[in-house]
């Protein structure tokens, strides 16, 4: 478990829609998944996307189905190569300047900055390494060099975000905890913090 000397802040940032301008999963799917697979499955998946947006299906269930449809059987090497290229070529175009400035200020102050995301660590690990940030994210399972289409462990969403943060960091060792999110799914993450920012605006209550 990581701690600090008590003088710094632990700054927790959701990624999709908080650091970026929008949810990046659809972009990564279109970038990384073979075109034939997208063409075949898209008509079947559209009703499920509509159901999730309408609240008839949880986002976690939809993401699990998408991972299975998109990546089952994909060679790990191909997946990792696409993830690296996505982090390098696509993500930089979708960042919120104001949020990147906040991250830079935290780093200049010597704070610990952590991206806490339900997105895939395959591309976030490269982006976070380039910016000197810690990462807690979701991982897709690999067996015998190929993706199974399942998550390795729980998706890093909802209460799992808070659980993993507590598991890795000793919150009381920091002078203060800040958290940034953009959807109700980030409520558990925001609840960890003394200073909570929702869509860029500080909130005194959740």
Image (spheres, rainbow, N blue to C red):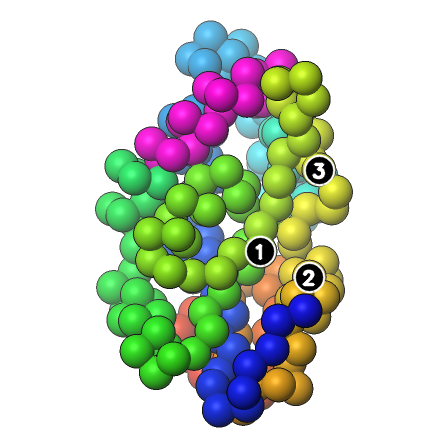
In the drawing, does residue 111 fall left or right of residue 154?
left
Q: Which residue is mark 3?
A: 152
- Residue holding disc 1: 136
Q: Is residue 14 above or below residue 201?
A: above
Element under disc 3: loop
Left or right? Give the position of 104 relative to 164: left
Asked whether the residues under the numbered discs 1 and 3 touch, taking CB atoms below 8 Å apart as contact, a structural biologist would say no
At 53% from the left and 43% from the top, the residue drawn is 121
x, y percentage for residue 94? 30, 49
* Residue 42 visible from this viewpoint: no
- The picture quadrant where one finds residue 59 is top right
Q: At numbered mark 1, what does the secondary structure look like: helix, strand or loop?
A: strand
Look at the image and give the residue range highlighted in magenta.
69-86
Which residue, given by chain and number where applicable, does mark 2 sit on?
164
Q: Are marks 1 and 2 in contact (CB under 8 Å)?
A: yes
Q: Is residue 147 above or below residue 102?
A: above
* 67 left or right, relative to 28: right
Query: Mark 2: which secondary structure?
Result: helix
Q: Position of residue 150 (x, y in %)?
A: 70, 30
> Is 99 placed above or below 37 here?
below
Judge by depth and name the residue closer to the eye, 199 or 123: 123
CA gap, disc 3 to disc 2? 14 Å
């Amino acid at each position: 478990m990581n701690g600090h000397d008590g003088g710094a802040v632990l700054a927790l940032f959701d990624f999709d829609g908080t650091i970026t301008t929008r949810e990046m999963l659809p972009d990564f799917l279109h970038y990384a998944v073979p075109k034939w697979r997208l063409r075949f499955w898209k008509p079947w998946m559209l009703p499920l996307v509509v159901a999730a947006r309408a609240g008839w299906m949880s986002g976690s269930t939809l993401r699990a189905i998408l991972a299975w449809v998109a990546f089952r059987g994909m060679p790990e090497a191909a997946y990792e190569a696409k993830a690296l290229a996505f982090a390098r070529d696509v993500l930089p175009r979708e960042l919120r300047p104001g949020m990147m400035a906040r991250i830079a200020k935290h780093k200049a102050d010597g704070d610990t900055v952590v991206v806490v995301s339900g997105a895939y660590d395959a591309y976030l690990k490269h982006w976070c390494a380039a910016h000197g940030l810690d990462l807690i994210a979701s991982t897709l399972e690999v067996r015998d060099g190929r993706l199974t289409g399942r998550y390795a462990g729980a998706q890093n969403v909802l209460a799992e975000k808070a659980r993993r943060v507590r598991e890795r960091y000793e919150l009381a060792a920091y002078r203060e905890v800040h958290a940034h999110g953009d959807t109700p799914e980030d409520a558990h993450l925001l609840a960890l913090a003394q200073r909570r920012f929702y869509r860029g605006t500080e909130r005194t209550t959740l």
